[in-house]
Amino acid sequence: MTHEEQRRYLIRELLAEDAQYQSIVIPENAQKQKDLLRALMNVRPPMPIGQDFLTVQDEYLSAERDMEGVVDVHDLPSLRCDERLVLWQGDITTLNADAIVNAANSGMRGCFRALHSCIDNIVHSKSGIQLRLYCDEMMNQQGYEEPTGQAKITPAFNLPSQYVLHTVGPIVEGRVTQHNRELLASCYRSCLELATENGLKTIAFCCISTGVFHFPNQEAAEIAVKTVTDFLQVPSSIQRVIFNVFKDADKQIYRELLGPNAAVETTH
């Protein structure tokens, strides 16, 4: 199958799973097809799916990944203050770090809102259906929702990273409390500890809790930098930590904390 034929096949298979989708017509426009495929993956509950589908999906997502381009974390310039630290602006799902950090919700099964812009949605969309299935099995075995401030590790499937570290950040309602601060620090520390336990050398952090969870960006960045730098004072397997930002405002905040020469623009 060609790349477009793969995309159409995947859409047809997902549409066939639910009677309410039978009136949906596959659009001719390639971007609209991509959006429809992603939306169907977003809303799909964690239920079994055939190996034929997964084989085609993996080929399709791998090709999409390669067309978008993979960013080698070892090529990113380190900070002058500490060669183990990097500040990089771009799409975290393009990094080939040993692990990228996903800001998850307490259900830990991804974002079920079609085409939502949160990192949880994007990570699951690009990783593939297997990630939700893996997380569902993991959480069913746990038997309760994931506590805030902890972390779990999963394979990254079709992402360029090897693993995804999922952590649930604190939700801020009104003023930031000391408990909020402690929980956010715990998110970073838990991810670093889990990476160390698994012998990982490179880890990329997103800006945990600063989106729909409403943690103020400045204070969140201060906690992130302090927690990471404190952790790196003790020997571990970690050789490089990437502070990944997407918004210009976050880039400026981190540059003020880490130094003016710390940011690298991305073409993505």
Image (tube, rainbow, N blue to C red):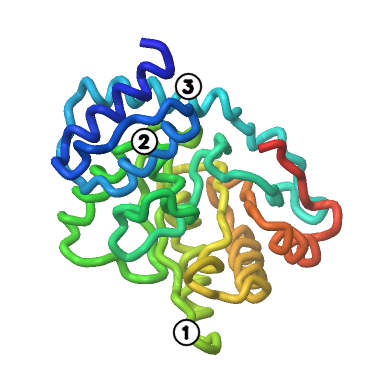
Left or right: 221 as drawn, with respect to 185: right
Viewer-closest of 40 and 66: 40
Say above or below: 256 vs 134. below
Do callouts 2 and 1 mark residues in contact (Cβ within 8 Å)? no
Left or right: 189 as drawn, with respect to 91: left
Query: Which residue type does callout 2 highlight?
Result: Leu
Based on the displayed image, in which of its 4 quarters is residue 127 positioned?
top left
Spatial distance from mark 3 to mark 2, Cα to Cα? 15 Å
Do callouts 3 and 2 mark residues in contact (Cβ within 8 Å)? no
Q: Earlier in the sequence, mark 2 or mark 1?
A: 2
Residue of label 3? 63
Q: Earlier in the sequence, mark 1 or mark 3?
A: 3
Structural crowding at the residue carrying mark 2, measured as other residues with C-alpha within 10 Å and reported as few (<14), some (14–19) or many (≥20): many
Pick the quarter of the image with the C terminus: top right
**From this viewpoint, which residue is outermost toward the right?**
260
Residue of label 1? 173
Residue 197: x, y in percent?
41, 50
Residue 60: x, y in percent?
40, 23
Spatial distance from mark 2 to mark 1, Cα to Cα? 34 Å
Viewer-closest of 103 and 22: 22
Residue 249 visible: yes
Spatial distance from mark 1 to mark 3, Cα to Cα? 41 Å
Disc 2, SS: helix
Residue of label 2? 37
Disc 1, SS: loop
Disc 3, SS: helix
Label ID, residue 83: none
Query: Which residue type does callout 3 highlight?
Result: Ala
